[in-house]
Amino acid sequence: MASNSLGQIDLQIMWNRLIAVVEEQAQTLMRTAFSSIVREAGDLSAGVFDLKGRMLAQAVTGTPGHVNSMAESVKHFIRHFPVETMKAGDIYITNDPWMGTGHTNDFVLTTPCFKNGRLVALFSCTSHIMDIGGIGFGPDATDVFMEGLYIPMLKLAEQGKMNETLMAMIRANTRTPVDTEGDVYSLAGCNDVGCRRLVEMMEEFKLDDLDELATFVIDNSRAAVLAEIAKLPKGSWRNEMTIDGYDAPIKLVATTTVSDTGIHVDYTGTDPQARGGINVPHAYTTAYTVFGLGCIVSARIPNNAGSLEPLTVSAPKGTILNAQKPAPVLSRHIIGQMLPDMVFGCMRQAIPDRVPAEGTSCLWNINVRGRVKDGDGGNYGFSVAITSNGGTGARPAADGLSATAYPSGVRGTPVEIAESITPLIFWKKELRPESGGAGRTRGGMGQIIEISSGIDLPFDLLAAYDRIDYPPRGRDGGVDGAAGYVGLTTGQKLKGKGFQQIAPGERLVVMTPGGAGIGDPRSRDPQAVAHDVEEGLVSRETAQRVYGLPLKAAE
């Protein structure tokens, strides 16, 4: 640091600048990514870390599952590659689910940042790689080795020279080698941008290191979260949830304890890990649990190592929320994204006025792949995740959000993009009327999507959906959200999980769940009901029967 200690105002300005640096890092990744799930949907994370592996700032762009698990992965990189051995131009890579972000489709890259020959920080980023071979992006594998290429902690580059052997291995183990290789370079490039911007900032503020700034960021964030926790009732609260599972329903159990020193969530009582790939490594369990807590307790406090420190998580080994290697984990988001709702179920017993009802929670990605004939009589493959989502749960003072991905934050893939990179035709993509659970505040609406092949070849659906048998639950008299559905326009119902083939001429129908409602529907504002009728979200019959709106008002 500079010889004179920095003032509070200077440190706050630098903190804001640090957040701007990592946001540019993330935007670079989005602009240069090849995979549509990254460049269109924002399925990524980016952040800067000190030399102890503590996250100092994260980009606003990104997902909690990536960000909060990446926050721990940098410590694993440091353990494998001690900071004193790092050189300028080195890049480290892994997709180890237990040391990365929970499944092998996420590549994590970490780059040491040097200023005047001295190591000052680490930049890390994550993005979803659309295809890494194996059984494909679905839950049908029975161990992690079936799920595709597995990269341990390795050097992607050494002093600026790319590891061409590793790049050749990556290209050889994917159905989309151009996209996959491009995404790796995109990840490396965004870290480089972050490094350059950080060095520029340090030169501008005459900093030799980040020690004082790191202490300021982490100490103030920790103190701010503890101050919010101090306002909460102290005690322990328990919540259970049953969800669809793979072979059989899965029971999740959480006990949340609020004390003077922090909040701890324990998942003792949760069912054992499953045969199929819906298991969750502990890092991903922690990531979404602490995100749910943060939304309730410390939503306005920046996310970093300090703000995360008072929020802790435990789950017994071998349960579905602490799956042990080599368990299959490729669709870990199906379970992991339910965990904010698990935490909410505990916290609404303590602070009901701040907690929403249950929502769709897990993404309803339409994971498809297939073949396309080329002009030479051969064919080539495509593989894509078309991101879609359902409704969120009603909020205590407002309706839930329709067709919104919470907690992941991933945006829906535009139809135009999906049709431009695949031979698929979208016949329908619209809000699903009546899917939001009725209540004083109602749940958000899900979607109805219809898709068919645009060529005389089938396509594969790698289904990984939940909330079909167990829809989002209403609270305080609110109605449950509509259950999800997967089938064909012929009326044939498909499985919610697993590989299925859609023949030419058939139309796939995906109906995403709606969020649940809060409170007695008859206490809902009549003007809000009339507005829903006008927008086609609620029928006149429902307005009268469920909400008690007079016929004249409903018309």
Image (cartoon, rainbow, N blue to C red):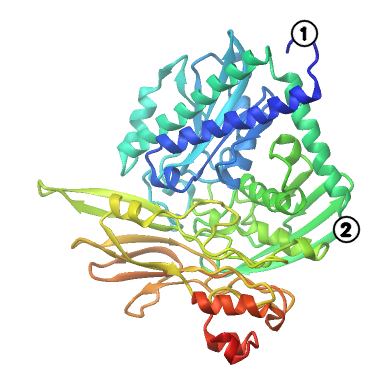
In-image side of 81 versus 141 (left or right):
right
Task: Pick whichever of labels 1 and 2 is earlier in the sequence.
Answer: 1
Q: Is residue 517 above or below residue 82?
A: below
Depth check, mark 1 against mark 2: the one in front is: 1
Give whichever of 395, 179 is nearer the camera. Answer: 395
Q: Is residue 319 above or below residue 45?
A: below
**Quadrant housing residue 354:** bottom right
Q: Residues within 10 Å of mark 2 (few under 14, many from 20)?
A: few
Locate the N terminus and report the quarter of the image it occupies.
Answer: top right
> Does residue 516 appear anywhere in the picture?
yes
Taking the spot 50% from the left edge, 33% from the top edge, the residue there is 94
Taking the spot 46% from the left edge, 27% from the top edge, the residue there is 188
**Labelled disc at residue 235:** 2
Give whichever of 555, 517 is nearer the camera. Answer: 555
Amino acid at the residue labelled 1: Ser
Give whichever of 188, 163 is nearer the camera. Answer: 188
> Does residue 151 appear anywhere in the picture?
no
**Labelled disc at residue 289:** none
**Quadrant housing residue 219:** top right
Provide residue 506's location: percent of width, then percent of height: 27, 71
**Labelled disc at residue 3:** 1
Amino acid at the residue labelled 2: Gly
Provide residue 446's location: percent of width, then percent of height: 51, 68
Provide residue 203's location: percent of width, then percent of height: 62, 13
Q: Is residue 47 above or below residue 542?
A: above
Q: How many numbered discs?
A: 2
Taking the spot 25% from the left edge, 56% from the top edge, the residue there is 423
Taking the spot 49% from the left edge, 45% from the top edge, the residue there is 42
Q: Residues within 10 Å of mark 1 (few under 14, many from 20)?
A: few
